[in-house]
Image: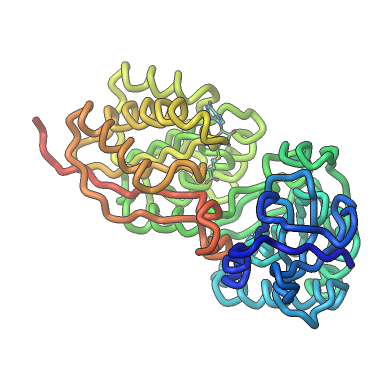
Amino acid sequence: MLQVSVKKGKEKRIRGFHPWVYKNDILSFSRKPKPGELCTVRDYRGAFLAKGYINPDSYIAIRLLTFKKEEEIDLEFFKRRIKEALDYRRAVVPENCTAFRLIHSEADYLPGLIVDYYSGYLVIQVTTLGMEILKEQVAKALVEVVKPKGIYEKSTVQTRELEGLPLVEQPLYGDIPERVVILENGIKFNVQIVGGQKTGYFLDQRENKLLFATEFVKEGDRVLDAFCHLGGFGIHAAVIGKAGEVVAVDSSQLALDLARENAALNGVEEKFTFVKGDAFKVLKEMSLWGEKFDSIVIDPPAFAKSKKVLEQAKKGYKELFLRGLKMLKPGGNIVVCSCSHHVTPPILEEILLSAAYDTRTPLKVLYTTYQAKDHPFVLQIPESRYLKCIFAKSFPWEI
Ligand SMILES: C[S@@+](CC[C@H](N)C(=O)[O-])C[C@H]1O[C@@H](n2cnc3c(N)ncnc32)[C@H](O)[C@@H]1O
């Protein structure tokens, strides 16, 4: 196996279980590395540190798989890692949920691999060349450990192109239905596996949807679900929170069609108004018409995909939060979310504060939450904390 040594001082982070070796940390190679191949990482004196796979042209040159010298990266290794990940999900995902993230890349020390479980089917995403080379072994291990009815690959993230990989969507094993019904907090959702967004559903908001419905929405409330996708927050509000009316906005017709079906599947379709359009425009128009809501959730896609566009992204979030706060009734509740890791919790708070000043909305913050427990973030990688939601209530003052 290729041997890679790191510069003096760079071993400390690896000994602390950070799963990346940066290109600039590398001191030498035992031979010319082949992109994607497995390698052993050593300190500058030659002592063993870890094993991983290498892409020598990437900024993150090595992604680590194990810190155990005797552990081989083979089928048994993947079976052990997957079993560990499955046991963890069984412990943290409630029984009334039949869909969850099984493998969350670095957070399961399987960098470059995402696996979501949807009622017996698996949807996988491979994001790096090293994991692409190991994919067959991974799929075999998934079949042996999870015993799924089918595995569908949806490796459509743009970052694959940086690794020289094409975007692919294909069945890998068994039968794959286009859609599958899942239970989330006991609520039914029809999820589009083939052709839908991401792996089909935003599983990372499971706990936030429940918190919103149980603690924020009151019986009879008028709710705004902005960027609703398959109706997750709104349907939780209608079913669990007993909201009286939900306005759900999204720009994707496919998402709205499914959201409508999902509302019907749970017997709450008569409470819903679906609005197709750009939420920036729709929320502006609604606030100009004088629409008011008791509870609002704003869960946009990641605006800040890189640090370069952070300032621009902040303006986008602020505009949405301003519109939302203008439509919030005194004493109403608002949840604002960002799934961009560049927007840190203090930055999100700063944007909400600025919108609260501009709209003269007194707000108390009850919770700042993150992605659900099956998408844990690794302390050693701050970037892995990508989703943040602020749950705030306005004071009931009419001014
Ligand atoms: C992060 S997802 C929302 C997830 C959803 N709230 C949930 O918990 O399941 C973002 C959604 O925004 C939609 N979207 C993207 N750009 C939009 C825009 N400009 N206006 C309205 N919707 C948009 C996408 O179609 C997607 O459904």
Q: Is residue 14 above or below residue 246?
A: below
Q: State the residue in front, 274 or 382.
A: 382
Residue at left offset 50%, top offset 64%: 379
Q: Position of residue 45 (x, y in %)?
A: 71, 72
Ligand 1 sits in quadrant: top right
Q: Residue at x 72, y 36 (%)?
A: 158
Give the residue at the far bottom of this rendering: 70
Q: Measuring 53% from the left and 61% from the top, which residue is drawn there?
A: 377
| Image side of residue 72 versus residue 114, left or right | right
Q: Where residue 169 sits in the image (x, y, percent)?
A: 84, 43
Q: Could one spot residue 205 in this view of the protein?
A: no
Residue drawn at the location 51% of the way across and 42% of the way down: 340
In-front residue for pair 245/223: 223
Residue 290 or residue 106, whichever sits in front: 106
* In the depicted structure, whether residue 139 falls above or below residue 218: below
Which is nearer the eye, 118 or 128?
A: 128
Q: How is the image coloured?
A: rainbow
Q: Quadrant of residue 362?
A: top left
* Image quadrant in which the N terminus is located: bottom right
Q: Say if residue 258 shows up in the picture.
A: yes
